[in-house]
Image (cartoon, helix red, strand yellow):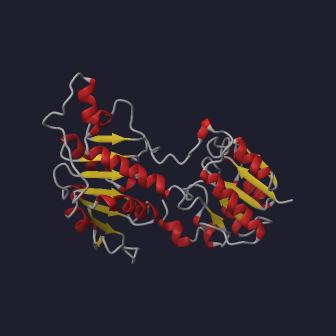
Amino acid sequence: MVKLLHIAAKKPEPRAWPPLFQEALRAVGELILVENGEAMTELERAERIRHCDILLTSWGAAMVPEELIVDRGRLKYICHVTGTVRKFIPRTIIEAGIPATNWGDTPAGRVAEGAMTLLLTLLKDLPRRGRIIREGGWRPDALTHTETLEGLRVGVYGFGAIGRRFVDMLRPFRPVIRIFDPYVGDFPADCVAVRSLEELFANSDVIAIHAGLSDETRHSVTAELLAKLPDQGIVINTARGAIVDQAALFAELEKGRLRAGLDVLEPDRLPDGHPARQWENCILTAHNLHALHTYGDAAPNRLDLMHDVALDNIRRFLAGQPLRFVMDVERYIRST
């Protein structure tokens, strides 16, 4: 019987390891869940892994030891149930040719939908409108913004799976769409490809960030770029907080010159009492807007999409079929 193993750093992450998923895995093979993996040495973890056929990693997993490069034992495949791989699987493991997959573009539509929600909320100034009504008013005041996507200059930074879905959602509203992504060669005919971030920011009313976090993109949205946006320009970030110089963006927001919809920050939580929690021109959604967990506790008899992808890949692997969302070195480098 095929042996499946998960080594949690402490305990298995409940969102990644609901009972229904564990039950489905046990229908495929022998599932072993190991707790407190961070208390084990890398040699001890490597030895446990060498005795399994498929290693499952996810949020909360212990790091895969590099010792497996020299001797992987019976390990044949690493199935990463969630998205971010770097925190759990070293690049050297990928370079060694051990097959590894993750959820791929599964959350793309939900992240793009979240970005669209933030953009429309800011364009219609819903936070201010809501406050006016809650405080006893009714009609918007003179400072309330009412704008439309039609004709708006929207700059898209990053044109991977999420960026493409975002553009698909924008298209019916007929904005002017510009895209910057130096790693993409095929752009839609109705969009303008630009050659630099400087060009993107200088010709946009809105910037929507959909790039992956890498050494190249880290803090690439600088104070100088933000200064190129017009007054009341909008920054939408549903990618990674570290792509933006957060201090520079917060300075613009505190002055009221720009607006922002931020699902992600650096670090990912604002301290209690931080003034940004009160700014009406800054919508914060706590890195949860993509709502990948479709059914949750309300429907315990249904798996989430990420579990469907993992189970599908495990079945493909056992049947000798091609895997989906295989992690090669280039994808590893560019992934968030």
In front: 143, or 236? 143
**Residue drawn at x 21%, y 27% as measured from the top left:** 138
Q: Residue furthest left?
A: 142
Where in the figure is residue 192, as x and y percent of width and height?
28, 72
Residue 76 in view, yes or no: no
Q: Residue furthest top?
A: 136
Q: Residue furthest right?
A: 1
Please identify the quarter of the rendering in which residue 136 is found: top left
Q: Is residue 166 left or right of residue 149?
A: right
In front: 32, or 308? 308
In front: 183, or 24? 24
Where in the figure is residue 335, as x and y percent of width and height?
49, 63
Q: Is residue 323 left or right of residue 51?
A: left
Where in the figure is residue 231, as x and y percent of width and height?
16, 50
Figure check: 7 above or below 154: above
**Residue drawn at x 26%, y 49% as measured from the top left:** 248
Q: Is residue 212 left or right of residue 51?
A: left
Figure check: 154 above or below 277: below
**Residue drawn at x 29%, y 47% as measured from the top left:** 260
Q: Which image quadrant: the N terminus?
A: bottom right
Q: Is residue 106 left or right of residue 56?
A: left
**Residue drawn at x 41%, y 47% as measured from the top left:** 264
Please identify the quarter of the rendering in which residue 97 is found: bottom right
